[in-house]
Image: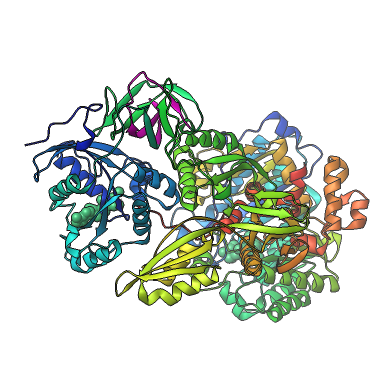
Amino acid sequence: MPAIPSPPGDTPPGRIRNFSIIAHIDHGKSTLADQMLRLTGVVDARQARAQYLDRMDIERERGITIKSQNVRMPWRSKADGTDYTLHMIDTPGHVDFTYEVSRSLAACEGAVLLVDAAQGIEAQTLANLYLALENDLQIIPVLNKIDLPAAQPDLYAAELAHIIGCEPDDVLRVSAKTGQGVEELLDVICRVVPAPVGDADVQARAMIFDSVYDIYRGVITYVRVIDGKITPRQKIKMMSTGATHELLEVGVISPEPVPSQGLGVGEVGYLITGVKDVRQSKVGDTVTDAAKPATQALGGYRDPNPMVYSGLFPIDGSDFPLLRDALDRLRLNDAALVYEPESSGALGFGFRCGFLGLLHLEITRDRLEREFGLDLISTAPNVVNRVVLEDGREFVVTNPSDWPSGQKIAEIHEPVVKAMVIAPSEYIGAIMELCQNRRGNLMGMDYLSETRVELRYTLPLGEIIFDFFDALKSRTRGYASLDYEEAGEQAAELVKVDILLQGEPVDAFSAIVHKDKAYAYGTMMTTKLRELIPRQQFEVPIQAAIGSRVIARESIRAIRKDVLAKCYGGDITRKRKLLEKQKEGKKRMKMVGRVEVPQEAFIAALSTSESPESAKK
Amino acid sequence: MASALPVGDPAPADGRLGESALLGLRGHPLGFYVHVPFCASRCGYCDFNTYTAEELGNGVSRGSYADTVLAEIRLARNVLPASAPTVSTVFFGGGTPTLLPAEHLGLILREIGEQFGLAPDAEVTTEANPESVTPAYLSRLREAGFTRISLGMQSAVPHVLSVLDRTHRPSRALEAVAEARAAGFEHVNLDLIYGTPGETDADWQQSLDTAIAAGPDHLSAYALIVEDGTALARKVNSGAIAAPDDDVLADRYLQADDTLAAQGFRWYEVSNWARSSAAESRHNRLYWSGANWWGAGPGAHSHVGGVRWWNVKHPTRYTAALDAGRSPAAGRETLSRRAMLTERLMLEVRMRDGLDLATLPESASRQAEQCVTWGLADRGAVYNGRLVLTQRGRLLADAVVRDLLDVL
Ligand SMILES: Nc1nc2c(ncn2[C@@H]2O[C@H](COP(=O)(O)OP(=O)(O)O)[C@@H](O)[C@H]2O)c(=O)[nH]1
Ligand SMILES: C[S@@+](CC[C@H](N)C(=O)[O-])C[C@H]1O[C@@H](n2cnc3c(N)ncnc32)[C@H](O)[C@@H]1O
Ligand code: SF4
Ligand SMILES: [Mg+2]
């Protein structure tokens, strides 16, 4: 017999269970969520669209969840016959959104730790598990895909038990695909996840854990009510800014939005106020009643903080206004995206953009190209460094062009991260060598099982955004997984390396690197450019320099023949057309001083093979 | 395979030209080009509009080809006004014009003279493959009024000739020059190709020395171009042979220019050298100086007063058009001012006389001075108002033209 749904706004907290699913990409989170929607009757088999919860195209293609969905499901426990209200809170699935993940977890009392029974746990899952433990969540360890012949449930149950400190028997075994064990899982959730606790009779407080822009409705804000009650037409106040809004609509997702009479203690749902920009509804902020505001905001709020910067330039200069409009549009739904106009001698007009991380950059760039039809060049990503001069002035450098060259520098600080790598133990040596090479400090190492190990490092973020993930994957034949989170800053001896063509610095190629890496960067860029830039009428020296000191040089030999030496008789038209075609080719060149550099050379020189691990859950 | 025709506007069936084009006949020499689209065999590098007997099949016979050309000359007479100047140069090119009986070439030349009048000092050239002529044949050409012969020697080195699919013996070109001299030809040219895969500096030197020793008064030396669609291009694309290297081609050019200069040949166009100004080809000059000429024969190009047109390529279609009393023109273009400027720069910059800067905006002179500082243009000439390329500049002539067009 199906459960009788309880009306939102009037659900006893004792019957509510709020949980999220922590899983690595492809371990089956979406399939499990679908299975739960079906079993609870929220979605019937007919209307069940595979992977109902992942909506965006890019998410589908990349298999990651960028914006999460949060669903309310009724469930009658087979164990105790009681009707429960379950809120499944999805967590955004990638490494750059650790803060958002932590807020989603903060909205729950429990977490399903879902691990592929043929693969074992991965670094990002482990990192999120630690986040969940910090938030005091009840962890339910689950092995998925036990229907697979390759599954090794006993091995990985032991591993999970070791990590969490439970008995291997406590690890549930399910198949999200066939549904085996999923009903039991729902019952376990009802039994072990604590009910939310709050005070219904004090001033309302609700935590924003997600905020999504919708073209029809404006911003949809997802909240978890801690105290009091939220009702439609109530005037609410955002505690971080003091801004007030009228609530046009309050409701729950099941699995489509359903307006309700309100949301009470422990409940999860959405608010609509008509604002048009997610910055007016910030993740982590506390919503309260404007008329009777709470005095104390919920803890943990923080402004999004761009960690990685890159210049985005339209290949066709006349697309600049289009790029600006596109960024303005994306920004409506991306509180972490910052940008300001930038002009580059080499690349023309564009924007210097700040991102949470490399993947955030990649996704943004992808969307600009795909959804807005733009062709972009992006400059090599860089981190934010703090430079203190001897005279005490301080610069926060987000663009190599702003590096205080030629001034007396007292100290430089670079951002560092705490990184975690999980890999088969045979790769320990290779991983240590790589991390060493990237100026890492080993902070600890644990065997998760006899054959798998977890290594903890602090590493400069600047080293991670430079090709680190690819290097890690290739040294471990793809077996290592990586996660990292920001961890303050450290003093570092960084220098700015300029690349000069015929003596002219090309701003797009400048980079801030550690002094021990300057030579390698210089040689890499000069050799690359020698291959990429076509020969000119004169010899073109390519130099890498720190200030006025040249550290690497190459040169492009002068072209010696650029003339058609054949008799075409009277076919002058053909000769002219050839020349006009050559002139067309010339138009696609950017001039750096007297040197003609093809667009493609910029793109190729700036493209690094680096790509962050694309997902975490 | 022969290269494609340009894309242009349709040409009227009677070949009629507009008033303004006809006005352009005044004050410029008028030339005639006659295309003969036949070859005994096809050379692998060649994309000229030419056909072997096998390729043509039964559609067009060499025997009646002259008659068809005569028909086009009469059509030309109807299109050009009576006031058109007499013809000062005639050039028979191909293909291999000398595959036709000398009398047929003579008939065509006579018709041109009868219809338009031939200037008393007219230059009358035919191209010839060395193996396609005999002393008797050459004498008949002289009798018919030919004054100049251009022989496709290409190389004096057997392995080079063989890569080029040339069938003549290395010594045949020299014999042909001597025979032409004996028959009374005052002007003899040899065509050479450099940069053929497998050719060494020494091979090229041998070809140059041999050509000079044969005693022509004019030499053309062309860098081997791998034209799309040719057998050579297929071999290069498949990797069977290496493409000519631009640096090697540049070296060969310098080698040629230095050798020829030392032997009394002076360049008057990037790829052309002559012993004296009288030995320079006036017909070529006419092409390069914006003068007018009628091109007869399949695929032939013409220019009159800013209108360029070109005939249908295939001999069968060409013959069919004229048999039906229609113009064989396939398309034409009326040159815009910009196109005329582009062509003028592109052609004049390549010549020894150079580009007249006085007739161009100031920006051209400034660019010319840049070229001087880059070592591409002659300082003294620019000082005197002409952009004349240096030896290095000749090798970069196209780049110089593009840069000039950028500032104009
Ligand atoms: N055999 C089997 N395949 C499963 C199971 N659960 C998920 N999968 C498959 O694993 C792949 C990844 O699943 P998905 O739910 O998209 O993973 P997510 O990336 O964690 O959301 C898909 O091809 C699923 O069909 C399972 O229990 N058994
Ligand atoms: C119209 S063609 C041929 C004339 C004559 N049939 C002969 O081959 O001797 C004139 C000249 O163009 C040159 N030529 C033809 N194809 C060429 C190519 N692909 N690259 C360079 N020169 C070429 C040859 O030197 C040739 O003699
Ligand atoms: S003989 Fe001359 S025209 Fe004929 S194919 Fe050879 S190069 Fe071309
Ligand atoms: Mg998924």
- Residue A473 locus on image (x, y percent): 42, 66
Q: Is A440 positioned to the left or the right of A531 in the image?
A: left
Residue drawn at point x = 43 percent, y = 20 percent: A291
Q: Is residue A351 visible?
A: yes
Quarter of image, res B98: bottom right
Q: Is B119 included in the stretch rendered in magenta?
A: no
Given the current orientation, which residue lies at the most extreme left position? A1
Residue B339 in the image, given as x and y percentages of width and height = 69, 40
What is the chief secondary structure element of the magenta stretch?
strand
Q: Which residues are magenta?
A: A211-239
Q: Position of residue A55 (x, y in %)?
A: 32, 40
- In the image: residue B384, left or right of residue A494: right
Q: Quadrant of ligand 3?
A: bottom right
Q: Quadrant of the C terminus of chain B?
A: top right
The location of residue B292, given as percent across then percent down, is: 73, 43
Which of the pair B110/B186 is nearer the observer?
A: B186
Asked if residue A218 is among those painted magenta in the image, a careful observer would answer yes
Residue A287 appears left or right of B268: left
